[in-house]
Image (cartoon, rainbow, N blue to C red):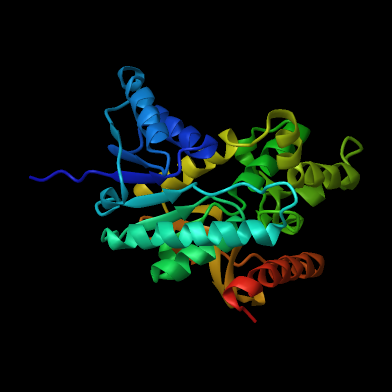
Amino acid sequence: MTRYTRRIALIGTGFVGSSYAFALLNQGIAEELVLIDVNKEKSEGDSMDLNHGLPFAPSAMKIWHGDYSDCRDADLVVITAGTNQKPGETRLDLLERNTNIFRAIVTEVMASGFNGVFLVATNPVDILTYATWKFSNMSKERVIGSGTILDTARFRFLLGKYFQIDTRNIHAYIIGEHGDTELPVWSSADIGGRPILEIIKNNPNYCKEDLNQIFINVRDAAYDIINRKGATFYGIAMGLVRLTKAILNNENSILTVSAYLEGHYGHSGLHIGVPAIVNQNGIREIIDLELNEEETEKFAHSVHVLKDTMAPIFNNN
């Protein structure tokens, strides 16, 4: 009897990629992990270092540095590769360069015969997820971006801290662009089935102003971390591992990912952060939250900002 082996191909072994690989090793999620990077010495060094931790890992894993041909038998290709914004460079300049990088990466992956699921983490993640979908010609369900999974985690963490409740029991979402136009969905946020907006109404210990500040802290978290340590990578690495588990284990878990809209929330033609059911086939279904009027307007603004940014490259209308 042939045993099924779960393989992940990681493209990009920078801060995020190497943190993701380390988290995978610690959680024992896959049987095989191949590291691919334009800097082959870096990927080789990472594979050596990770292999030396195997005696302490929860399960066996084959880890090696390889090339795009190794993507052929992968269940999941995770892309964290890309370039950072340079001084004096605009967001569009960065997008153009990363789009060209992604065109080359995705072309190589597809040439290998890959037939699994793409998971994209490189910023701007919503637009580069769209680019991956375009360049791969895969079905929209099998191309996922990390979207607002990290923003939602930050949101739940700060709300848990504020209400002194285990963050895993906080049910609240950040949706929209993974960036400055993202928004909190207060209208559906709850703790133990009790709406958060109802909880704060008659309790002098809580107030709406505090909630507004919590969202601001979520939205600006990356800037605050970058100012202190230069980059963010642990949180997003854990988010990618959570998505990996949902995909490889066919969990049908609801996670806020960058998904392609086709009439959802009244919009179409782009990838953006929304709650979706994730399983071994990628996105099973997008969850349409009932947004209030203010949330609907803010989400529409986020959509328009993304579309305006994409237009010079993809000629979107």
Rendered-image quadrant of the C terminus? bottom right
Q: Nearer the viewer, residue 101 or 264?
A: 101
The residue lying at 59 percent from left, 49 percent from top is 149
Left/right of residue 236 with respect to residue 186 in the rendered view: left
Residue at 35% x, 18% y: name it.
56
- For residue 39, what is the image quadrant? top left
Is residue 190 depicted above or below 287 in this figure? above
Q: Position of residue 157 (x, y in %)?
A: 68, 36
Q: Is residue 276 visible?
A: yes
Q: Residue furthest front?
A: 88
**Quadrant position of residue 293:** bottom right
Judged from this view, the residue extending furthest toward the bottom is: 317
Residue found at x 62% / y 46%: 84
- The x and y percentages for residue 178 are 66, 54
In the rendered image, residue 274, in percent from the top left (x then y), is placed at 60, 60
**Total numbered labels:** 0
The image shows residue 71, relative to residue 100, as above or below, that is: above
Q: Looking at the figure, which quarter contains the N terminus?
A: top left
Q: What x and y, as percent, mark residue 120?
A: 49, 53
Tell whether 208 sits left or right of 12.
right
